[in-house]
Amino acid sequence: MANEVTLLDFWPSPFGMRIRIALAEKGIKYEYKEEDLRNKSPLLLQMNPVHKKIPVLIHNGKPIAESLIAVQYIDEVWPEKAPLLPSDPYQRSQARFWADFVDKKIYDLGRKIWATKGEEKEEAKKGFIECLKLLEGELGEKAYFGGESLGYVDTALVPFYSWFYAYECEGNFSIEAECPKICAWAKRCLQKKSVSESLPDQKKVHGFILELKKRFGIE
């Protein structure tokens, strides 16, 4: 069966970065299609009619929406190289738990850091750091969340590192000072080509956020 793989994405999306990393880890060639989220393509609307959002992975004409589901799909369809999820059922359940934790907490709190002010911003910063400290505890002394190699939780979390500089600038705090182990882990991940080539420049992401703030009238 031919493997025709397309990714509908938008460059600063940490969710799209997850899929890019997973595909790169597996050595899968794919066509990248950048979406204009203010003028969504007919293909995006056709492939993700429920949420109408990026990213969408298209494999042989079949769409897979939601980034964590797409990463699991990639791991199952191409199991021969760089397994991302553990083979042990319990360890696999724990990896899914922490990836879900990242999904539910990190993006939302990070957004509040740049999109809110006053007490709400301070609460978001506090919650964000608390979440990263919990993740530091889960990482422990391991090189990666996946152990000795990049895994599912690493793939879920590391894209947000490209947003850290923006969070720090907008929140006026230092993530590295608060959570040095997470930052050291992220830099270790960036030594891998699959990660470094999938994550955009942090200052470019901050520029994108400044544009968003301007567009939405956020002071």
Image (tube, rainbow, N blue to C red):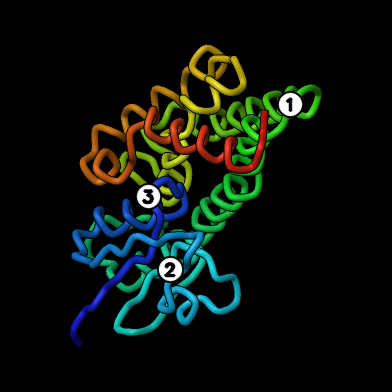
Identify the residue at horizontal 49%, vertical 77% (top origin): 45
Rendering coords of residue 165 (x, y %): 46, 25
Mark 2 vs mark 1, CA separation in Å: 33 Å
The image quarter containing residue 171 is top right
SS of the residue under disc 2: strand
Helix, strand or loop at disc 1? Answer: loop
- Residue at 74% in and 26% down: 117
- Locate the C terminus by quadrant: top right
- Estimate the x, y position of residue 151 in percent, counting from the top left: 38, 48
Q: CA distance from mark 3 to mark 2?
A: 13 Å
Upstream in sequence: badge 3 or badge 1 = 3
Please state which amino acid type lies under the numbered disc 1: Lys
CA–CA distance in space, label 3 to label 1: 26 Å
Three-letter amino acid code at disc 2?
Val
Ranked by sequence position, the earlier of labels 3 and 2 is 3
Furthest residue to the top?
Answer: 177
Q: Position of residue 129 (x, y in %)?
A: 63, 25
- Identify the residue position indicated by label 1 in the image: 117
Q: Residues within 10 Å of mark 3 (few under 14, many from 20)?
A: some
Choose the circle earlier in sequence order: 2 or 1: 2
Tell me the number on the disc at residue 11.
3
Q: Nearer the viewer, mark 2 or mark 1?
A: 1
Residue 154 placement, left or right of 81:
right
Task: Say which amino acid is labelled 3.
Answer: Trp
Q: Which residue is mark 2?
A: 56
